[in-house]
Image (spheres, coloured by chain):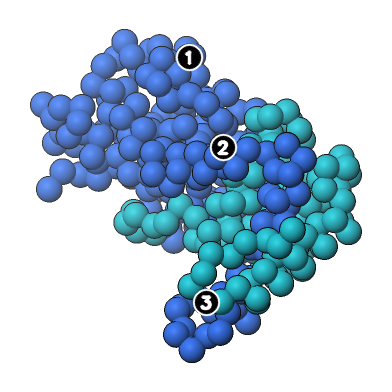
Amino acid sequence: MPHDHSDPDHPHALLPPDPALRVKALETILTRKGLVDPAALDEIIDTYQNRIGPKNGAQVVARAWSDPAFLDRLRADATAVISDLGFFGRQGEHIVVVENTPQLHNMVVCTLCSCYPWPLLGIPPGWYKSDAYRARAVREPRKVLAEFGIILPETMAVRVWDSTAEIRYLVIPMRPEGTEGLSETELAALVTRDSMIGTGLARTPE
Amino acid sequence: MSDKPEPVFSAPWHAQAFALTVHLNETGRFAWTDWAARFGANLARHGLERDLDGGDDYFHVWLETLESLLEEDGSAGRAEAEHMRAEWERAYITTPHGMPVRLGR
């Protein structure tokens, strides 16, 4: 088995796990054929590791809470509005916003694989990609929500949206009470990643 | 589920497999919808055997999908990929600890 720590007695470089060697093999082959630019790979990793994440989505939600005209435009064509804010690119081709209300809770899944609005939320968390979530979100959403600590009143309907490679959803959670007068920046800090997937609620200010 | 920051990729090779796939899509090797359909079908097939955890499991299927796609379109055949994988393994084993690992030509 490969080691994942430094070992001064180890005579040779630590051998990466099998899949890591297979990825390196593909990368080398394709680079030598001129099909891949290694610098572009580094740029992609850096973007998703360091630059794109749920902060983008939180900014959109905070603005939607604060500015009714903006919310109207989001409802009409979220892809265009979000792209105007500079959040465009991969996996952001067609974004639809779904709004939580006192009567309706929305939650998002991708039963096929893990389609997700990358420009707004970054790379999906492990649980979003797991078989358990992908299978159960549709079948027993209330039970799944309860495991995330969300118990909804019986009177509130739950709607589950199945993302695809062509269409991705962003949940606009309900604005927490007691947030009147907060700035967009302060509001954005209350918007969690999970609240935009629908497996959480926005935080209430302390 | 807590909202504390977690690493975007839990292993470096997850990030590399991801980046390679995104790059190949962007340079026109395949459409993302085709990728998602193949990957989804492979996930479903593997998921019949046992529940996949969304981490290593998920990226194993991802890599397998990428390998078969590149084999089919002829850009990296299976034998070629296996040979190159062995080359990398040899490079690691023959490089003294602490030295940069490079492929022999």
Residue at 33% x, 37% y is: A55
Q: Amino acid at mark 2?
A: Ala
Decide: is A169 above or below A137: above
Residue sitting at 15 percent across and 27 percent down? A183
Residue B81 spot, x, y in % from top left = 81, 57
- Residue A192 in picture, x, y percent from top left: 33, 44
Dot 2 and dot 3 within a common chain: no
Q: In the picture provided, is A183 more to the left or to the right than B28?
A: left
Q: Which residue is mark 2?
A: A40
Name the residue carrying label 1. A80
Rendered image: mark on residue A198: none
Residue B97 is labelled as 3
Asked whether disc 1 touches disc 2, contact meaning CB atoms under 8 Å apart, the reply is no
The residues bearing labels 1 and 2 have C-alpha atoms spaced at a distance of: 26 Å
Check whether the beta carbons of the residues at disc 1 and disc 3 lie within 8 A of each other: no
Q: Colour of chain A?
A: blue
Q: Chain of mark 2?
A: A
How much space separates mark 1 and mark 3, taking CA atoms? 52 Å
**Chain B colour?**
cyan
**Front disc: 2 or 3:** 3
Q: Residue at x 45, y 43 (%)?
A: A46
Alpha carbon separation for disc pair 2 and 3: 28 Å
Q: Nearer the viewer, residue A47 or A16?
A: A16
Where disc 1 sits, the SS reads: helix
**For the residues carrying marks 1 and 2, which lies nearer the camera in this image?**
2
Q: Give residue A57's quadrant in the image.
A: top left
Q: Is residue A100 visible?
A: no
Left or right: where does residue B87 sit relative to residue A46? Answer: right
